[in-house]
Image (tube, grey):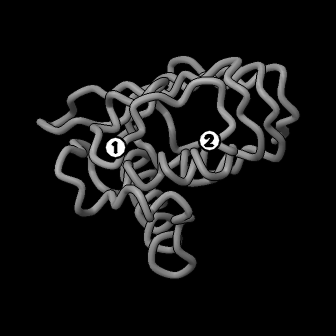
Amino acid sequence: MVYCRRIYALIVMTACMVLAFCRWGVSTTYASTLDCSTASNIVVPSTECQILLDFYDSTNGSGWSTASNRDTDTDVCGWYGVNCSIHSGQNRVSEISLQTNNLVGSLPESISWLSYLRIFNVGDNVLTGTLFPSWDVLTGMEYFEVWANQIGG
């Protein structure tokens, strides 16, 4: 049963990523300074890098209290509030912790496609919107905080 659930989660996640990146496209407002597919020091899959940029754009990253290390060629695992861990020999985004950091906007659905995300803390910001049903595939989530926002779902 657990095996079937993981296969289903993988299929759903893959389908969502294909739709987002191929059909509608993920926000690329930040793409003029960072191209996740060609930057030499990005050590996570380019799709995870792009999801982080999408999150940055949809939560007014330029207005965050702290957003250090977002250079054009900086490893995303060193960005403020982002941590990575090794899975199957590759760095993967495992934590986003940006509590009380002046995030304003809504959470993009693509965040739920970070399959190795274990810690997500965006409490005490100015976020609105709904948590998408696709968040259900994050079965390994250990810590999830969105308090003091206007998020439903």
Cα–Cα gap, marks 1 and 2: 38 Å
**How many numbered tags mark residues here?**
2
Task: Identify the image quadrant of the C terminus.
Answer: top right
Write the residue at 23% across / 62% down.
38
Q: Which residue is mark 2?
A: 61
Provide residue 92's location: percent of width, then percent of height: 30, 37
Q: Secondary structure at mark 2?
A: helix
Front one among 65 and 10: 65
Can you give x and y, in whole percent of width and height, for residue 149 in the image?
83, 28
Give the numbered dot on residue 22: none
Name the foreground residue: 100 vs 116: 100
Badge 2: how crowded within 10 Å, few (<14), some, or many (20+)? many
Of the 4 image quadrants, the one containing the N terminus is top left
* Disc 1: which residue: 3
Going by the numbered disc 1, the residue's amino acid type is Tyr
Above or below 145: residue 29: below
Judging depth in this view, the residue of 73 and 125 nearest the camera is: 73
91 vs 6, nearest the viewer:
91
Sequence-earlier tag: 1 or 2 = 1
Residue located at (67% from left, 23% from top)? 101
**Residue 97 horizontal/vertical position (percent):** 54, 22
Side of 94 relative to 104 (left or right): left
Closer to us: mark 1 or mark 2? 2
Residue at (46, 64) in percent of width and height: 17
Percent of width and height locating residue 94: 39, 29
**In the picture shown, does residue 116 fall above or below 21?**
above
Position above or below: 8 against 124: below
Q: Is residue 32 above or below residue 117?
A: below
**Do labels 1 and 2 touch, CB within 8 Å?**
no
Q: Tell me which amino acid carries mark 2.
A: Gly
**Mark 1 Cα-neighbour bin, 10 Å: few <14, some 14–19, many ≥20:** few
